[in-house]
Image: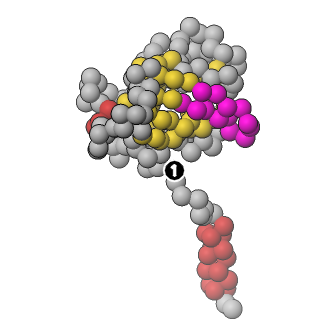
Amino acid sequence: MGTWGRVLLGTAVLAAGCTTTTPSARPASTDGTSGAVPAATGCASRVETGTLPDFADAGFSALARIPHVLGAKGEIVAVLFGYPLTWDRKDGVNNKILWVARPARTASDPASPADLTITATLDGTDTRVTREVAGGPGPSIIDLPRAGCWHLDLRWSGRTDTMDLVYADGRAATGGAGPGR
């Protein structure tokens, strides 16, 4: 094999070693802009700072850029007014989350509770807690017992979705950067 053949073969091997077979969790942003901020812990859901999805932007200006996380199925969005979400906050800011559900395509099951039930599991542990938002998706303050990546199973009105949220350690860093200040 000649010099150019070895260079091309070496380049191909290097390129193959730099690729990944793990699909991206979601596009960079719901509006096609590059406003995503990947979670520091490797959580699958990313905090996006582009415009909100159309179904969740009522009451916001068309140019509003607010941190939010879209559920894996796209059925719900968590608008993060207390960003960054923080465990053991010392700065007086709450972990305010506005939950906005995509309008239902079919009538909800009248036997299903309307409350939003959040079952949160800390990544890599068996730590699991449940939180409820009375009346279904809407405004809430969601505090979780430890810092880290939390996997959330969300259930309301017979519907489901999932997402990951990162809670930072409030003892290590204070001062929020979101509009909830």
Above or below 27: residue 71: above
Q: In the rendered image, is residue 22 in sight?
A: yes
Image quadrant where one finds the N terminus: bottom right
Relative to the observer, which residue lies in front, 47 or 74? 74
**Residue 72 locus on image (x, y percent):** 47, 45
Q: In the rendered image, is residue 173 in sight?
A: no
**Main SS type for the magenta part?**
strand
Q: Residue at x 60, y 27 (%)?
A: 130
SS under mark 1: loop
Question: In the rendered structure, does residue 27 fall within the stretch colored magenta?
Answer: no
Say what amino acid the circle numbered 1 marks.
Answer: Ala
Res 150 quadrant in image: top right
Q: How dense is the environment of label 1, judged by Cα within 10 Å: few (below 14), some, or many (20 and up)? A: few
Q: Which residue is mark 1?
A: 25
Question: In the rendered structure, does residue 126 fall within the stretch colored magenta?
Answer: yes
Relative to the observer, which residue lies in front, 129 or 15? 129
Seen as rendered, the residue at the extreme front is: 111
Q: Residue at x 61, y 75 (%)?
A: 12
Q: Would residue 113 be found to the left or right of residue 61 on screen? A: right
Q: Would residue 162 be found to the left or right of residue 42 on screen? A: left
Seen as rendered, the residue at the extreme bottom is: 1
**Residue 155 locus on image (x, y percent):** 48, 35
Res 34 quadrant in image: top left
Q: Residue at x 51, y 17 (%)?
A: 141
Segment tinted magenta in the rendering: 118-130
**Residue 78 locus on image (x, y percent):** 44, 31
Count of residue discs: 1
